[in-house]
Amino acid sequence: MQTRHDARHTTQTLTAPEWWRTAVIYQIYPRSFADASGDGVGDLRGITRRLDDLADLGVDALWLSPFMVSPQKDAGYDVADYCDVDPLFGTLADFDEMLAAAHAREIRIIVDLVPNHSSDQHPWFQEALRAAPGSAERARYIFRDGRGPGGDQPPTNWDSIFGGPAWTRVTEEDGSPGQWYLHLFDSSQPDFNWENEEVREEFRRILRFWLDRGVDGFRVDVAHGMVKDPSFPDWSPNPEAASMGGDSAPAPYWEQPGVHEIYRDWHRLLAEYDGDRALCGEAWVSTIEKTALWVRPDEMHQTFNFHYLETPWEPAALRRIIDDSLRAFGAVGAPSTWVLSNHDVVRHATRLGLTAENPQGTGIGPDFPGLPEPQHALRRARAATALMLALPGSAYLYQGEELGLPEVLDIPDEARQDPTWFRTRGERYGRDGCRVPIPWESDAPAAGFSSSGRSWLPQPEGWGTFARDCQRDDAGSTLSLYRRLLEVRRAHGLGEGTLRWLDPGELPGVAEGQSEDVLALSNQDVVVLANFGATPIPLPPGRHVLASSTELVAESGAPDREDRAPLLPQDAVVWLVSPENVPLI
Ligand code: NOJ
């Protein structure tokens, strides 16, 4: 078997073509990763200091959530200057240093691009507010006259994703009540008008700015929403399926065909650069087949597979979505991606143990019905990760999941920051629970996040027990599991492999009726078994265990029998290899 070091040089050097097809990409949420300045908010120098830990984990690339100039009304997804670093996070020089240090470790850097909307503090929006209705300044955003007498009703009935109306009325320069502007998110995030060539040209400039600095790609925010239905019709969501675009009859601001021309344009622009720079779309699209339209050969390179993220921990549902994903993305020549957690959803070390519905972005708090027992949910999360990382394609990890971090439920109301919490007057918790600064050292102030002990969201009691330093040398820790899975994934080329389902009914020792609780697959020379059922299943004889999401249990019976097969318990996944490469079935 190759060592990890050798494998890195054969499969994932910085010159590897189309690296994004198989890459494991680690999401850094800069506010909450590592704070070098001591102000309680993570920063770029903090990231640079911790790069060795990420190299040790074995990831291929980092995606950084926004660190550009922003009043931070939506944690940086409200950008006031796309081509500079917010002083909260450092300087452009800090960025260049971080990028060079990452590249020196053969880790690529993807930055977040937020093209659907800017901050209301962006100079263009400030100019638009001062300009007259119908002016060129207003035409960069979506301003409309209101309806009803005096224009005092919003132009459409659309709701903001964060709650409340999606339109806000401005006061004109002369003090009179004026036009309305569209903001699909917070009122501090006015939507750009992508029908306007000036907007398109400005974003080409922004892309070039970061490409010239050497970034390897972009994660594109709200990639399903930049173009709106030009007739601006009223629309009522289907309450059963309402989520960020996850509705079978898409809203007039999601999935509009006009978005694709933008990505074709950007694809051509990226292709002018060396090194296979990549675009990854954050597109919450209603079906997996439609999602694949975002990654046609001349559009984006990847898109997040949120359909996978939203699939419950059930064997039949997982098998279906895995097949559908490989089929849909394969049909357009794109890799499938896989993801279980990010900064917008309940962490999967909690979510997979929930029994009640929790629509995406709503968040959970201490009063949420049926909260899981933490160890049970973590066990499932580890199994889910082991299944995900066995799949061919590219996978995304969210900072802290490698530590097994749960969602934080008991953030005091006065400490909450998500605009969702404010716009719904506390009815929806929002996403703060997955954004709490991560622990590094068990005994340090702020668990090693910040030497000053400050933390922009409070860390809960006991957070230090998840710290990296206590997990590093513990073979049974979640960190050790992730490290091992990534090492084996690389050494066995699972990212570029092919999935083949195996019939669990034919596995030796799997009883009749038990097979529907089991998923069995092979990828390259690795066989993966996942047991969802209460009855442990015996591992096939003659296999070597490469990785296991949990400790295997011993077969009951005569304790002195040497040939006792280890058993795979419930909610566990094991990766096996046959020393002689003998097919399993
Ligand atoms: C999606 C981002 O992931 C989320 O955090 C943000 O609030 C919205 N887009 C608006 O930019």
Image: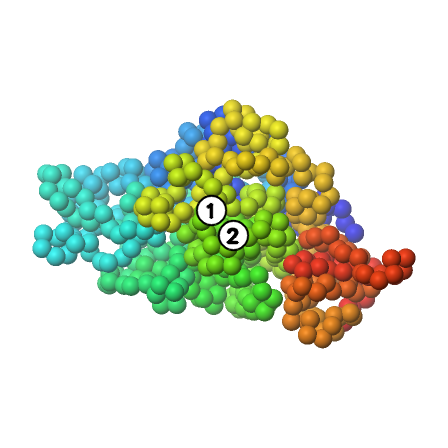
- Front residue of this view, candidates 66 and 510: 510
Return the mark for residue 508.
none
**In whole angstroms, how far apart are the C-alphas of marks 2 and 1?**
8 Å
- Residue 167, position as x, y percentages in the image: 24, 51
Return the mark for residue 366.
1
- Residue 146, position as x, y percentages in the image: 16, 53
Q: Amino acid at mark 2?
A: Leu
Which image quarter: residue 445? top right
- Residue 151, position as x, y percentages in the image: 12, 53
Give whichever of discs 2 and 1 has the lower sequence position: 1
Q: Is residue 17 visible?
A: no
Mark 2, Cα crowd under 10 Å, few <14 / some 14-19 / many 20+, is some
- Could you tell me how many numbered marks the image carries? 2
- Front residue of this view, candidates 344 and 460: 460
Q: Which residue is denoted by mark 2 in the rendering? A: 371
Q: Is residue 66 visible?
A: yes
Do callouts 2 and 1 mark residues in contact (Cβ within 8 Å)?
A: yes
Residue at 19%, 54% in the rendered image:
154
Residue at 90%, 57% in the rendered image:
560
Dot 2 falls on a residue whose secondary structure is loop
Colour scheme employed for the rendering of this structure: rainbow
For the C terminus, the quadrant is bottom right
Q: Is residue 318 above or below residue 274?
A: below
- Residue 11, position as x, y percentages in the image: 67, 50
